[in-house]
Image (tube, helix red, strand yellow):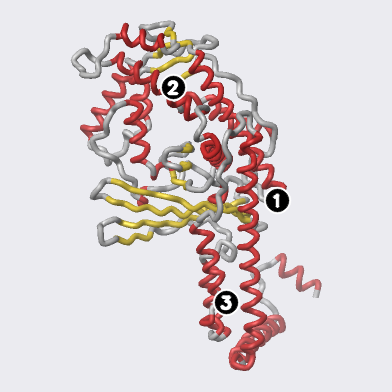
């Protein structure tokens, strides 16, 4: 027997012995005969089949779903509880997120319930097996843990609005976790608008431990992929630069693919109560998402306080408004004499060190460099893909010329202001708090058996993700600081 085994290992193409072939055939026939007999006796065995097989299948799905819901609720409450521990203490009570709506988790509950419906009990054993396979195909607890890009489903309402939806299962770097993303989009080309939202779930493919990421948001907030939020983004650009888009770009779900158009697009938008995200698959993506979720909780706690990012934006935009008028021609109706502009700013406690403007930011402690309107214009044009063939060639040439000209006119006005410095310091503290809260949430879930960032193993790994965002925090807000204040990386 040992000799035959060794020969088979050494010569895999060697024919099997007739005895082994007959034994294998006999086993297959016995299994087939067993299933045939059980199917034939199905009416008699239905009672046992109901209580054992259906009950066992539903219990497994139900327990997995309940575990996920409990872990998600605990994590959401943990996130909310972090805000009072920050550098900046809240003045009001934050709003808890009760009953987070996640379409993926809601569907999961419905799919699990299907296995106990009366119609299922009436099925034969064979029909039940087929129904079970079909049901589990779309279940995050029952399906194979493989990355799959879903197909977009579209339907048109009577008013012409096209409802689009797609569900993807995406592998995170390292392949330990799957990220489930369901994106819904209402596309209204007649009004040139679209409204998108996302449901997000992350799951460990080995243990099955699952977290509803929507449960971490405060009540009233939602996720939107950054590239599906174009119209809202352009509204912001218009408010900052004063440049009006003749034609708003609407986002069609057919053009969406996570990470391709805006991988770094993580942002919290207080006015719209949304959290934008970029590429969640890459290492640090989920950590960046948690950072923005922390900002959403800060908004809930601080929305009546004149502090932090909200106050910073108000003061900064006031300064930016006056600085932007320096580039207007005299025939512009908004033109104002530069001396009057500087006089107004000085009366507001803002002193400019170089009223002609510098080509590069001034690297001096306590100096805040305010860019002129061309800086923001350049930034926003650089976000556009000028190689996109859908943009007419003449338009691309015009934009390229405008980009080159605008770059040559960029100036920075170095100012000193105790008022702006004070609100900026609070803004810096909120940024540091948000990263600390994100890291503490990662630690909290690691203790619960779910590692949201399995590739971030050491302190240096976390710093590698956080530092680029910290150093660019002022740039992303539209401001350049001469000497950037030091951010202490929170302890892991």
Q: Which is more toward the observer, 53 or 163?
A: 163
Q: Which residue is mark 1?
A: 448
Q: Check the image and report above or below for 78 versus 89.
A: below
Q: Are marks 1 and 3 in contact (CB under 8 Å)?
A: no
Q: Would residue 33 be visible to someone looking at this image?
A: no
| Mark 2: secondary structure | helix
Residue 430 sits in quarter = top right
| Mark 3: secondary structure | loop
**Residue under the image location 55 percent in, 45 percent down:** 95
| Mark 1: secondary structure | loop
Is 327 positioned to the left or the right of 426 in the image?
left
CA neighbours of label 3 inside 10 A, class few (<14), some (14 to 19), many (20+) = some
**Residue under the image location 70 percent in, 84 percent down:** 23
Q: Position of residue 347 (x, y in %)?
A: 40, 10
Q: Earlier in the sequence, mark 1 or mark 3?
A: 3
Q: Which is more toward the observer, 120 or 455?
A: 120
Residue 65 sits in quarter = bottom right
Q: Position of residue 419 (x, y in %)?
A: 49, 16
Q: Which residue is mark 3?
A: 116
Residue found farthest to the left: 331
Q: Position of residue 394 (x, y in %)?
A: 21, 32
Which mark lies nearer to you, 2 or 1? 2
Q: Earlier in the sequence, mark 2 or mark 1?
A: 2
Distance in Å between CA atoms under marks 3 and 2? 59 Å
Q: Which residue is mark 2?
A: 315
Q: Would residue 215 be visible to someone looking at this image?
A: yes
**Residue under the image location 62 percent in, 51 percent down:** 176
Quarter of the image containing the N terminus? bottom right
């Amino acid at each position: 027997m040992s000799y035959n085994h060794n020969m088979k290992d050494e010569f895999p193409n060697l024919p099997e012995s007739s005895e082994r072939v007959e034994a294998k055939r006999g086993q297959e026939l016995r299994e087939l005969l067993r299933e045939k007999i059980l199917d034939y006796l199905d009416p008699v065995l239905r009672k046992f089949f109901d209580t054992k097989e259906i009950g066992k299948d539903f219990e497994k799905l139900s327990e997995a779903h309940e575990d996920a819901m409990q872990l998600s609720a605990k994590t959401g409450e943990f996130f909310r509880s972090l805000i009072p521990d920050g550098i900046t203490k809240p003045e009001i009570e934050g709003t808890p997120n009760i009953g987070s709506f996640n379409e993926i988790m809601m569907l999961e509950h419905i799919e699990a319930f299907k296995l106990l419906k009366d119609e299922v009990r009436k099925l034969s054993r064979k029909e039940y097996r087929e129904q079970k396979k079909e049901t589990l195909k779309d279940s995050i607890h029952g399906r194979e843990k493989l990355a799959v890009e879903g197909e977009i489903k579209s339907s048109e309402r009577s008013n012409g609005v096209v409802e689009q939806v797609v569900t993807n299962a995406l592998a995170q770097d390292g392949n330990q976790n799957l990220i489930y993303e369901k994106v819904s989009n209402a596309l209204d080309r007649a009004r040139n608008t679209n409204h998108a939202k996302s449901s997000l779930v992350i799951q460990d493919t080995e243990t099955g431990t699952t977290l509803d990421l929507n449960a971490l948001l405060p009540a009233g907030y939602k996720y939107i992929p950054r590239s599906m939020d174009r119209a809202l983004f352009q509204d912001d650009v218009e408010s900052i630069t004063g440049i009006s888009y003749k034609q708003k770009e609407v986002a069609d779900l057919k053009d969406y693919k996570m990470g391709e158009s805006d991988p770094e697009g993580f942002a919290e938008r207080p006015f719209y109560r949304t959290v934008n995200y970029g590429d969640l698959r890459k290492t640090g993506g989920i950590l960046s998402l948690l950072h923005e979720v922390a900002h959403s909780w800060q908004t809930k706690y601080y929305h009546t306080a004149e502090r932090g990012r909200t106050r910073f934006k108000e003061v900064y935009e006031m300064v930016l408004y006056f600085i932007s008028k320096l580039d207007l021609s005299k025939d512009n109706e908004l033109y104002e004499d530069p001396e009057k502009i500087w006089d107004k700013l000085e009366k507001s406690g803002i002193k400019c060190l170089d009223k002609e403007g510098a080509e590069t930011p001034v690297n001096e402690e306590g100096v805040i460099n305010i860019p002129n309107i061309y800086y923001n214009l350049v930034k926003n044009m650089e976000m556009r893909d000028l190689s996109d063939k859908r943009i007419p060639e003449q338009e691309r040439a015009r934009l390229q010329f405008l980009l080159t000209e605008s770059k040559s006119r960029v100036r920075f006005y170095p100012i000193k202001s105790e008022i702006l410095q004070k609100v900026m310091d609070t803004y810096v503290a909120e940024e540091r708090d948000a990263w600390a809260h994100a890291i503490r949430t990662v630690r909290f879930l690691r203790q619960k058996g779910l590692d949201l960032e399995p590739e971030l193993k050491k302190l240096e790994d976390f710093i590698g993700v956080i530092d680029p965002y910290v150093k660019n925090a002022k740039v992303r807000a539209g401001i350049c600081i001469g000497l950037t204040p030091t951010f202490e990386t929170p302890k892991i």
